[in-house]
Image (cartoon, helix red, strand yellow):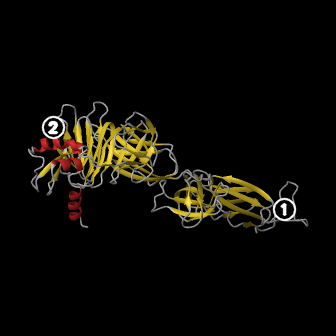
Amino acid sequence: MNRALALVWLLGASAIAHGAGKDYVDYRVRPGDNLYLLAERYLQHPAQWQRLAELNRVADPLRLPPGMTLRLPAALLRGTPQRATVLYARAPADAIGADGRRRPLASGDTLREGEWIEAGASGFAALRLADGSDIEVHPGARMRLERLREVKELGRSQKTMTLSKGRVDVKAAPQPPDSRFDVRTRLAVTGVRGTHFGVQVRERDGAALTDVSEGVVEVDATRGGARRVAAGEGAVVAGGADAPAVRPLLPAPALDGAAERYDALPVVLALTPQPGEHGYRAQLADDDGFARIRQQWTVAAPRLRLEGLPDGIHYLRLRALDADDLPGVALEYRFRLKTTPVAPLPQAPVQDAVLPTGRIAVQCSGIPDAAGFLLQYGPDAGFTAAATRSERARDCRFELAQDRPAVLYWRVATLEGMGDDAERGPFSDASRLRVVPAPQAPVLTLESGERIQAHWGAVPDTRFRVQLARDLAFAELVADTTVDEPRVSFDVGARCRPYFIRLQAIDQYGLQSAFSPPRRVDPDRAVCDTRGEPVMQQDGRSVRRGSAG
């Protein structure tokens, strides 16, 4: 169906019912009809033929021309009483009979004409009429089922509700021609055919408010004026008004940064303020049709804080309120809450650790009986989909390959299952680490004699560890020192055996390079005895060979 056809269909199916504000229905006279027969057939008592005669100015009740149109008083039509069914009720929500007896409502209960439905400050009731129309009775509302009748002989129905306080929302099924579907308040009557609308009695002064989501309604002020109210419009009838004041509804509220899933409570939602908003009405439901309202409240600030919710799918409906408390167009928002299973605790690397490029080991505390664990990591704390990578493991250990310098954020979650449909619990708090180039040990340059001297190229923000040993395995260390300058010297005196020296770089983060390859430092030409020790002169100096070598 294209847009133009859909629009024509919607207007046609939701047009105002003819006579929605009238107190009568039209009847076309058939051959053999007279007022006595019509009163006996359609009205509550045969003697009411006299009311038919007065209303239609009929002089002879036995002589009615076929084809003539008679007015039948709607209030006198007998019809067949219908019942309403309770789809859902949240206490406190009660039914009050004509005798004043009160009973709590429960799903599946039936309600009759004349009964009151009253919802407490935290109560709610969803009703379904026999024709499939739905009525939501909001917290603090009180409504009476005045008349629920079907006149089968005329193919018409009558449904009249009286709202004395609070608010009701109505999803009316399409009504047969000349049927009545009215919601009455002290100041106005809202008549409808096949549409979705709300009626409210304003608490501070009793003003009648009507807002239309789909279709068209007719609002009649009790002082005489009537106005047509279409989808996206609302009407206000205040005390003393001769006619409803009709105006466009405020646009739907705008959520700022709302997510599809939340892992922890409270869920805090921010709204973007728009001109004309004086508050917000929120409803939280268990179903997308909002028949099972869990909670309803009004806030002044553009911020919602949701607490005490179980895990699962939740549905939120938001309306902005204008200066008259008339609710605007609804925003419906679906989100998921998943607070289990508990997240593991990150263990390594520690927060703000600095690691060299290469293989990075990530470890977290395990959760007993967990099916597995999920690691997410990426270059931003928000873990955006485009830049975030994920890995799974049955134990809480992972190894990442990071060959380039970067700042990485990582977090872990517990998995329920390891297949493609595995569910995860909430993530741990994000940890941050820095990956930097691994330091490299510079190349040593050596000078030797009785003093071993080494130097190398300078590296900014780097210290150096130098080891000198008598063996290639560096098990027999002669010196192990750390210096800031790119040079070192060791006074080792005369020697007959070689030494070995190696160097390690330590950068500003404390990361250590591998030791450089060991360099051999040969003996310094001392004359050695049979034990391999230097031969010493009386003055304590070693005996040197005749030439350097």
Question: Helix, strand, or loop for circle 2?
Answer: loop
Residue 489 image-quadrant placement: bottom right
Residue 147 image-quadrant placement: top left
Closest to the observer, 450 or 192: 192
Residue at 32% x, 54% y: name it.
131
**Res 224 label:** 2
Residue 393 image-quadrant placement: bottom right
Label 2 or label 1, whichever lies nearer to me, is: 2
Tell me which amino acid carries mark 1. Val
Instruction: Give the residue number, with chain letter if any, for mark 1.
Output: 543
102 to 409, vertically: above or below: above
Horizontal side of residue 8 vs 500, given as left or right: left
Tell me which amino acid carries mark 2. Gly
Horizontal side of residue 90 vs 357, given as left or right: left
- Give residue 252's position: percent from left, percent from top: 31, 48
- Give residue 192's position: percent from left, percent from top: 24, 49
- Give residue 413's position: percent from left, percent from top: 58, 56
Closest to the observer, 278 or 67: 67
Horizontal side of residue 389 vs 197, given as left or right: right
Task: Tell me how far mark 2 sits from mark 1, CA to CA.
Answer: 132 Å
